[in-house]
Image (cartoon, rainbow, N blue to C red):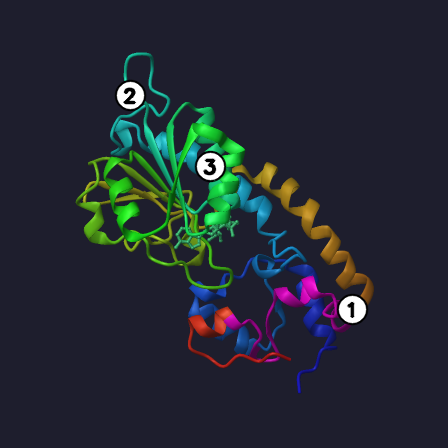
């Protein structure tokens, strides 16, 4: 039986609101289980409409920043192709491929179109692709996500932005090392999904101090905490959505707060037990419902 009323637990939570991303980090998962802490992960707090309200502002920022960073690393000095995304009259525009058309992908798309790039967006959800077409009209091309479409689009792309999410689970590897050889030398991959393990096989987490590396001539940008680069905007965006949940926990204590479905959906571990099914599946561990 799990003790839902341990004061130590919610005290810790109040001090340390966090993204945990446990599916991508077995060592951290085991450490949190050993500590018997209660971990409420921002990224799995789920709204009644299945939205992820605490991930959303960071995804908006990461999506917008992905194009800004990608455009920079396309510059020749950084090993990029030397392509200006918007082009100029008489030369072709840079081609941006966005894989995953959710919040991060849509925000990346908005900025890429704003910069005048030629944008293609790929998603596994036909409903989402229809929504994207309604939002952006003919300014983007939409493609269903499958290995054929991804391989074709990769060959053309100057900048590829990985923004897929399977909530709580490790990101699927949609670009394999072999695919890099078919890409244009100096193309840039920005793996926003790196915090969930990355959606490109060759991705590994990097830091703002040394954000890129090159494999097979392809520049990889894989910063796991992209919003940290614009910390003022990020803090303002994040605290405006997390406050509500912090106040519920402070007012009601963790045991009553966990009766709120949104806070309960954020519960990843408690009293040494894994409480999130997708994380348990990612590490082949037991999952406890209650
Ligand atoms: N690196 C960072 O700093 C940072 C910051 C914020 C968010 N993120 C990450 O960005 C990713 C996207 O987050 P989001 O909030 O936009 O998620 P989201 O749920 O809004 O969107 C994810 C999209 O991926 C699509 N998808 C799932 N599987 C797919 C597949 N096989 N092929 C193509 N599309 C697929 C879904 O249909 C959905 O539209 C997550 O991994 C999130 O953790 C990273």
Residue 177, horizontal then vertical, whole percent: 22, 53
In terms of sequence position, does the residue under pointer 1 or pointer 3 come before the other? Answer: 3
Q: Residue at x 22, y 49 (%)?
A: 179
Placement of the C terminus among the 4 image quadrants: bottom right
Disc assigned to residue 227: none
- Nearer the observer: mark 2 or 1; the answer is 2
Q: Residue at x 52, y 41 (%)?
A: 131
Residue 228 visible in the shown view:
no
Q: Which residue is mark 1?
A: 253
Placement of the N terminus among the 4 image quadrants: bottom right
Pick out the residue farthest to the bottom.
1
Was residue 38 drawn as part of the magenta stretch in this picture?
no
Q: Which residue is mark 3?
A: 108
Tags 2 and 1 in contact by the CB under 8 Å rule? no
Residue 138, horizontal then vertical, whole percent: 44, 28
Q: Which residue is mark 2?
A: 92
Dot 2 alpha-carbon crowd within 10 angstroms: few under 14, some 14 to 19, many 20 or more:
some
In terms of sequence position, does the residue under pointer 3 or pointer 2 come before the other? Answer: 2
The magenta segment is: 254-277
- Nearer the observer: mark 1 or 3; the answer is 3
Q: Secondary structure at mark 1?
A: helix
Residue 26 lies left or right of residue 16; in this view the side is left
Q: Quadrant location of residue 68?
A: top left
Tags 1 and 3 in contact by the CB under 8 Å rule? no
Front residue of this view, candidates 125 and 53: 125
- Whole-angstrom CA distance, mark 2 to mark 1, is 58 Å
């Amino acid at each position: 039986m799990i003790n839902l009323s341990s004061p130590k637990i919610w005290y810790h939570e109040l001090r340390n609101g966090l993204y945990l991303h446990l599916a991508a980090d077995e060592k951290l998962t085991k450490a949190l289980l050993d500590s018997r802490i209660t971990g409420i992960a921002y990224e799995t707090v789920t709204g009644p409409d299945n939205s992820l309200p605490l991930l959303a502002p960071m995804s908006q920022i990461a999506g917008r920043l992905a194009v800004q960073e990608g455009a920079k690393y396309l510059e020749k000095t950084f090993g990029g192709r030397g392509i200006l995304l918007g082009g100029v009259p008489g030369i072709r525009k840079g081609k941006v491929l966005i894989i995953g058309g959710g919040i991060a992908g849509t925000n990346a798309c908005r900025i890429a179109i704003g910069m005048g790039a030629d944008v293609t967006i790929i998603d596994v959800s036909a409903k989402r692709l229809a929504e994207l077409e309604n939002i952006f009209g003919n300014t983007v091309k939409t493609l269903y996500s499958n290995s054929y479409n991804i391989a074709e689009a990769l060959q053309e792309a100057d900048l590829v932005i990985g923004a897929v999410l399977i909530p709580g689970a490790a990101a699927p590897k949609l670009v394999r090392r072999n695919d890099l050889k078919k890409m244009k030398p100096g193309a840039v991959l920005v793996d926003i999904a790196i915090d969930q393990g990355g959606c490109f096989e060759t991705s590994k987490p990097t830091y703002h101090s040394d954000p890129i590396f090159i494999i097979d001539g392809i520049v990889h940008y894989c910063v796991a905490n992209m919003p940290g680069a614009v910390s003022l905007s990020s803090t303002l965006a994040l605290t405006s959505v997390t406050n509500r949940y912090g106040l519920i926990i402070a007012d009601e204590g963790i045991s009553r707060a966990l009766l709120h479905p949104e806070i309960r959906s954020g519960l990843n571990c408690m009293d040494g037990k894994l409480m999130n099914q997708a994380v348990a599946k990612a590490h082949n561990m037991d999952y406890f419902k209650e």
